[in-house]
Image: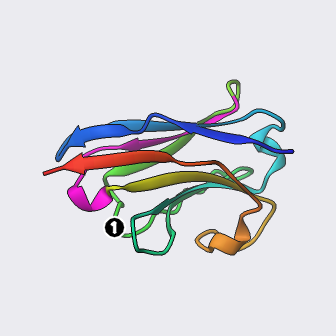
Amino acid sequence: QVQLVESGGGLVQAGGSLRLSCTSSERAFSSYVMVGWFRQAPGKEREFVASIEWSQGSTPYAEAVKGRFTISRDNAKNTVYLQMNSLKPEDTALYYCAASKGGVYHYVRSYDYWGQGTQVTVSS
């Protein structure tokens, strides 16, 4: 059973920064086609934030976070990061890490394994 574990969430003031981490305990991320970050705010659907395509390293972002968030990876630590800068109250959500065997990068259904999520709360 693949387990993805997110960490790094918390409470931060608007304009602040957080770095989320995602690790896979059972399988190397390099065995997946892509790893993505999604978020879900109360009462809203889960939405794409960013992803990294493992072989070529492409990193698409949602328009709402482009220029503020950066996805990266550390192969040696089998970890994917999401650096979040200039945070806004509308970034408040439960953030999920997910791994995909293939598909369209921004579709929830493209991802096969999900973590439990880490809460990010941005106060105004």
- Of residues 108 and 43, which is closer to you in this image? 43
Asked if residue 77 is positioned above or below residue 1 in the image, the reply reads above
Q: Position of residue 70 (x, y in %)?
A: 43, 47
Q: Quadrant of residue 62?
A: bottom left
Q: Give the left or right position of residue 28, taking residue 47 as reference.
A: right
Q: How is the image coloured?
A: rainbow
Q: Quadrant of the N terminus?
A: top right
**Residue 83 colored magenta?**
yes
Question: How many residues crowd around disc 1 within 10 Å: few (fewer than 14), some, or many (20 or more)?
Answer: few
Residue on which disc 1 sits? 64
Q: Is residue 54 visible?
A: yes
Does the segment drawn in magenta span residue 75? no
Q: Could you say where residue 18 lies in the image, as x and y percent from the top left?
A: 35, 37
Residue 25 x/y as whole percent: 77, 32
Picture quarter containing residue 58?
Answer: bottom right
Number of marks in picture? 1
Horizontal and vertical percent position of residue 82? 47, 44
Dot 1 lies on which element? loop
Magenta part of the protein: which range?
A: 78-91
Residue 59 sits above or below residue 76 on the image: below
Looking at the image, the residue that sits furthest to the left is 124
Which residue occupies 70% across, 24% down?
Answer: 76
